[in-house]
Image (cartoon, rainbow, N blue to C red):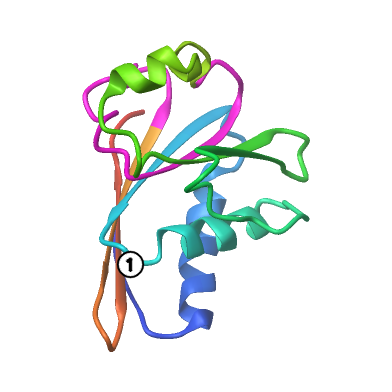
Amino acid sequence: MKKNITTIDQLDKAVDAFAKDLENKKKVVVLLQGDLGAGKTTFVQHLARKLGVESYTQSPTYTLLREYTMSTGSKLYHMDLYRIAHIEELQSMGIWDTLFQQEGVYCIEWPELLLGHLSHEELVYHLLLHSTEEKREVEIHKLSH
């Protein structure tokens, strides 16, 4: 599915349709790829609101991982792997061992390190975000299930 987005209203509609596809799923991984400024964090912020997260959703660039509670009681995990050069760094921090162990929605920005390392247990979506001065484009691909 490909969506062209030129307004916040169009972004809300795209995120709303995506959020509906996530309903009643126990574990979902959302991989967000795109250049700096393409809208990865903004997409996650809108998705978090649609999923009932009441607190402000911040970029986890410096903290690597932020955790939020959705209206269902499940968690939304927001990761940013921009500063991670090798998958071994996630292993040495203990993140790799606990990654995807809990039910919830895992939104991962800059996921290139994880591609090819995900199990087939998770429902995985790959979002490609592109931006120009006039518009943003979101391509959503379902990779499993």
Residue placed under numbered mark 1 in the picture: 38
Q: Position of residue 28 (x, y in %)?
A: 49, 33
Residue nearest the viewer, comparing 137 with 64: 64
Q: Quadrant of the N terminus?
A: bottom left
Q: Is residue 54 left or right of residue 77?
A: right
**Up-down relation of residue 111 to residue 34 (above or below):** above
Q: Which residues are magenta?
A: 100-123
Q: Quadrant of residue 131 in the image?
A: bottom left
- Seen from the viewer's position, the closer of residues 106 and 88 is 88
Say which element carries label 1: loop
Left or right of 58? Residue 56 is: right
Q: Amino acid at mark 1?
A: Ala
Image vertical order of residue 80 relative to residue 88, above or below:
below
For this rendering, which residue is in front, 57 or 23? 57
Of 103 and 132, the residue lying toward us = 132
Q: Residue at x 31, y 38 (%)?
A: 111
Quadrant of the image occupied by residue 80: top left
